[in-house]
Image (cartoon, rainbow, N blue to C red):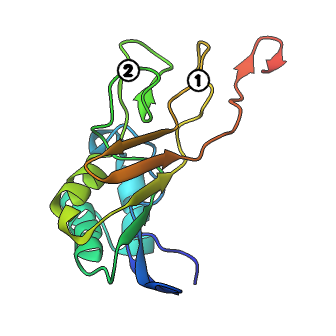
């Protein structure tokens, strides 16, 4: 089973064991306030998680149970990594620019930092910015490297077709 959403998987390696922990799947970004009732209903159906508090708790519990260092895999990165358009989780398509990261992931990482979380990888936020330029794709905070792997173009409908 390759779905690591809301769970932990121990992975043997040449130097010991590390854990892969999955954060909230199907995240749109923008924190818990941006998560719709329909999304929470789907998360409840698929994963048994139906509230922001449950989401934070499940991720935190998975991290605290980690064997060895924990590598976090998420759809969207955590809140708290910057409020500029070019920030790794920055909202760049409309002003005012802001932090578009997930609160539950931020809170879970903060609560479980003692287990050792060397990497948090995600891929929701496109590298090319809406109005030109590029997003920061890697940053480091408190011993964790954050990597945004969304190196994909944006597509949107215009009056002349898809751009």
Rendering coords of residue 30 (x, y %): 36, 37
In the image, 67 versus 25, the foreground residue is 67
- Which quarter of the picture shows residue 109? bottom left
- Distance from disc 1 to disc 2, alpha carbons, whole Å, reads 12 Å
Q: Is residue 6 above or below residue 85?
A: below
For label 1, count other residues whose C-alpha is less than 10 Å away and answer few (under 14), some (14-19) or many (20+): some
Q: Nearer the viewer, residue 123 or 118?
A: 118
Do residues under tags 1 and 2 come within 8 Å of each other at their CB atoms? no
Task: Report whether residue 51 is seen.
Answer: no
Percent position (x, y) of residue 10? 43, 85
Q: Which mark is residue 134?
A: 1
Where residue 104 appears, as percent x and y from the top left, is 26, 53
Q: Residue 116 in the image: x percent, y percent? A: 28, 67
Residue 107 falls left or right of residue 62: left
Question: Is 12 left, or right, of 130 in this rendering?
Answer: left
**Quadrant location of the N terminus?**
bottom right
Asked which quadrant contains residue 19, the reply is bottom left
> Where is mark 2, residue-wise?
84
Q: Residue at x 61, y 43 (%)?
A: 150
Q: Secondary structure at mark 2?
A: loop
Labelled disc at residue 117 = none
Closer to the camera in the image, 159 or 6 = 6
Depicted 157 relative to depicted 15: above or below: above
- Farthest residue in the front direction? 15
- Identify the image quadrant of the C terminus: top right
Task: Judge from the rendering whether residue 73 lies leftward or rightward of residue 133; answer left or right.
Answer: left
Which quadrant would residue 159 be assigned to in this image? top right
């Amino acid at each position: 089973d390759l779905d690591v959403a809301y769970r932990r998987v121990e992975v043997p390696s040449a130097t010991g064991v590390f854990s892969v922990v999955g954060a909230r799947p199907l995240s749109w970004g923008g924190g818990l306030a941006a998560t719709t009732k329909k999304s929470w209903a789907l998360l409840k159906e698929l994963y048994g998680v139906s509230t922001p508090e449950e989401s934070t708790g499940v991720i935190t519990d998975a991290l605290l149970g980690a064997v060895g260092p924990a590598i976090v895999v998420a759809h969207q990165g955590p809140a708290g990594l910057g409020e500029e358009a070019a920030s790794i989780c920055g909202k760049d398509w409309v002003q005012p620019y802001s932090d578009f990261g997930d609160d539950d992931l931020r809170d879970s990482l903060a609560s479980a930092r003692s287990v050792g979380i060397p990497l948090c990888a995600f891929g929701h936020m496109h590298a090319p910015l809406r109005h030109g330029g590029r997003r920061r794709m890697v940053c480091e905070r408190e011993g964790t490297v954050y990597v945004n792997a969304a190196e994909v173009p944006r597509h949107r409908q215009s009056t002349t077709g898809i751009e």
